[in-house]
Amino acid sequence: MTKARKPQYPIPIQAAAVVPALIGAGIGALGSFGLNRRSHPSIFAAGLIGGITALVVWSTHGRLRAAAREFTSHLDTARDLRWLARNPIDYA
């Protein structure tokens, strides 16, 4: 018996990302219909692009959330410093 070989370059796709990829592919394919009749390759290409986009967004949403949280934190700090510069507090 031969052992099953592991792929040399595994694709980092989470199982939970498959559903958003299929939804993105469906939206991309439906969006390509429009008013004009399109060829099957263009519908396939739009679905493929929509699916890949949804897959990338879903698999990186944790990092995007962390970046947005850090950005908001820096924005709040800058807003507070600006407010304190315009409204000094006298403890006398």
Image (cartoon, rainbow, N blue to C red):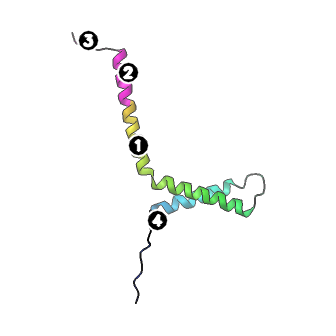
Q: Nearer the viewer, mark 1 or mark 4?
A: 4
Q: Secondary structure at mark 3?
A: loop
- How crowded pointer 3 is (Cα within 10 Å; few <14, some 14-19, many 20+) is rated as few
- The region drawn magenta spans 76-91
Give the residue pinned by disc 2: 82
User: 5 and 47: which one is in front?
Assistant: 5
Disc on res. 67: 1
* Spatial separation of the CA atoms under disc 3 and disc 4: 60 Å
* Spatial separation of the CA atoms under disc 2 and disc 4: 46 Å
* Spatial separation of the CA atoms under disc 3 and disc 2: 16 Å
Marks 1 and 2, the one that precedes in the sequence: 1
Magenta span: predominant SS is helix
In-image side of 42 versus 20 (left or right): right
Q: Is residue 87 magenta?
A: yes
Give amino acid for label 2.
Arg
- How crowded pointer 4 is (Cα within 10 Å; few <14, some 14-19, many 20+) is rated as few
- How crowded pointer 2 is (Cα within 10 Å; few <14, some 14-19, many 20+) is rated as few
Give amino acid for label 3.
Asp
Q: Secondary structure at mark 4?
A: loop
Marks 3 and 2, the one that precedes in the sequence: 2
* Spatial separation of the CA atoms under disc 1 and disc 4: 24 Å
Q: Position of residue 90 (x, y in %)?
A: 26, 12
Disc on res. 90: 3
